[in-house]
Amino acid sequence: MFYGTVAWDPLLIVAQIVCLQCLYYLTLGVFLLILVGTRVSKMSLVYFFDYATVTASTVTGWCVMASILLSSVAGAGFLVYLVERAKKCLDFCATLYIVHLFICIVYGGWPSSITWWVVNITGLAVMALLGEYLCMRRELREIPISRFRSRTSESLQKVKDEIDFVSKFNC
């Protein structure tokens, strides 16, 4: 697909946002299960969406913060395959964290913890910058042309051989 010829497709954009959001929460769940699940007796959505769990005063709070930041690093990897364009990474990351903010507001009220804001803004920055970097590296990779050229030269050689073969019988 050539990047300059892509038309605006809102269905594709919504599908990419939904996939990125689902992958982010899946990854966050895995990291929460590994880091927080070993420390608490019962896992719940509180660790996903309640701002009170993001605190620097407990070890569990530090584990929640680490899970959020590790999920943002994994989200940068998801951007490479879902979004594929460096200039779109910030838009998709901001959308993901705005949707997360709305879900947190519905679940536990307005996040009044400074720690929650610092961790989520840092996660947004990490995901956007690392995602842009990885997408730029992918966009700037060389396109392998040598394989195409070798097939073309082989095809030309076959055509020349066939012409020689036919010309022997036409004498």
Image (cartoon, rainbow, N blue to C red):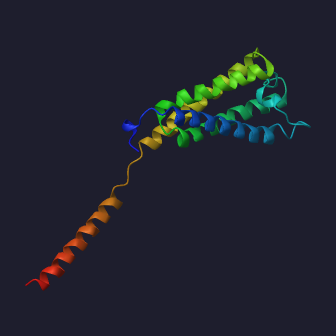
Residue at 17% x, 76% y is 163
Residue 64, placed above or below residue 77: above
**Horizontal side, residue 9 vs residue 24: left or right:** left
Tell how many labels.
0
Residue 125 in view of the camera: no
Check the picture and name the quadrant holding the C terminus.
bottom left
**Horizontal side, residue 58 vs residue 98: left or right:** right
Which quadrant of the figure has residue 45?
top right
Q: Which residue lies furthest to the right in this view?
A: 41
Residue at 82% x, 36% y is 36
Residue 146 or 60: which is nearer the viewer? 146
Residue 59 or 84: which is nearer the viewer? 84
Residue 59 or 68: which is nearer the viewer? 68
Residue 44 in view of the camera: yes
Check the picture and name the quadrant holding the N terminus.
top left
Residue 139, placed above or below residue 129: below
Residue 25 or 119: which is nearer the viewer? 25
Residue at 26% x, 66% y is 153
Residue 33, placed above or below residue 102: below
Q: Where is residue 44 in the image (x, y as percent from the top left)?
A: 85, 34
Q: Position of residue 90 (x, y in %)?
A: 53, 28
Which quadrant of the figure has residue 71?
top right
Residue 133, placed above or below residue 52: below
Q: Where is residue 30 in the image (x, y as percent from the top left)?
A: 75, 42
